[in-house]
Amino acid sequence: MAIRLSASLAAASLPEMKEVLPLLSRLGVEMLHFDVEDGQFVPSLTLGTKIIGDLRSHSQLTFDVHLSVCQPERLIPEVIQMGADRVAVHWEACDYPMRTLEMIRDGGALSGLAFNPKTPIPELGYLIPILDYILVLSTEPVIPECEFIPEMASKIFENKSIYGGTGLEWVIDGGIQPENVAVAAGHGADILVVGRGIFKDGDIEKNVQTLIEACTDRWDSNPR
């Protein structure tokens, strides 16, 4: 079973990224994941928006932007102008999600809704025409080096069955490692956002291959 990977810059060595981008592409990684944070919606400040524009001319990878911010409407035009191909905003931060998703679509990017682990996925039928993907966080974003929460894979499985046939993509983000990658993919995740699992110890090629092999080796035995 093929898996689609989005490499999270939150775990990368940024000074080396120009050299790393061609390697990621060669290894079959499809996306580069940017966590843009404001220190309010989540306590941390990992990346700003400038890095998106700085790297855009150096890669043909899909730029996958996750806005962990209050009032995401303020940043949507900026990140799209800088080169974002996909933009996810948090359900918890959107008073009017239809308007917010339409802003993303009108800017020319794919639109996503992100959900923290504690947040149930609500009825989304009215948003389907303007919604491209769901991003389920599988770790608490405020805890450093946080561990994968396996119940979040079940969250995808349960909701994907409700919205089957709608064309929605399902993305899981947080704590993905070789020991749990098959669980995440086996429960219906279409795209896996991976940080430490790709960039740890600087051996990107080995890490990506290990992820792919772990998923393939364990796929048949993975509970669904």
Image (tube, rainbow, N blue to C red):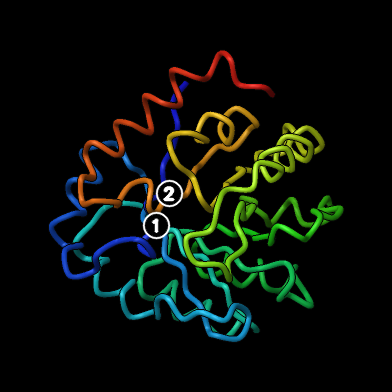
Which residue is disc 2 drawn over?
Answer: 194
Label 2: element kind: strand
Q: Nearer the viewer, residue 63 or 166?
A: 63
Q: Residue flagged by tag 1: what amino acid is it?
A: Ser
Q: Residue flagged by tag 2: what amino acid is it?
A: Val
Q: Spatial distance from mark 1 to mark 2, Cα to Cα?
A: 6 Å
Which residue is disc 1 drawn over?
Answer: 8
Which quadrant of the structure image shows residue 143?
A: bottom right
Provide residue 37's location: percent of width, then percent of height. 51, 78
Which mark is drawn over residue 165?
none
Left or right of 141 in this view: 91? right
Q: Residue at x 74, y 71 (%)?
A: 92
Provide residue 126's location: percent of width, then percent of height. 83, 55
Q: Residue furthest top?
A: 220
Q: Are marks 1 and 2 in contact (CB under 8 Å)?
A: yes
Left or right of 91 in this view: 176? left
Left or right of 194 in this view: 27? left
Say if 58 sits above or below 183 in the image: below
Say if 188 sits above or below 170 in the image: above
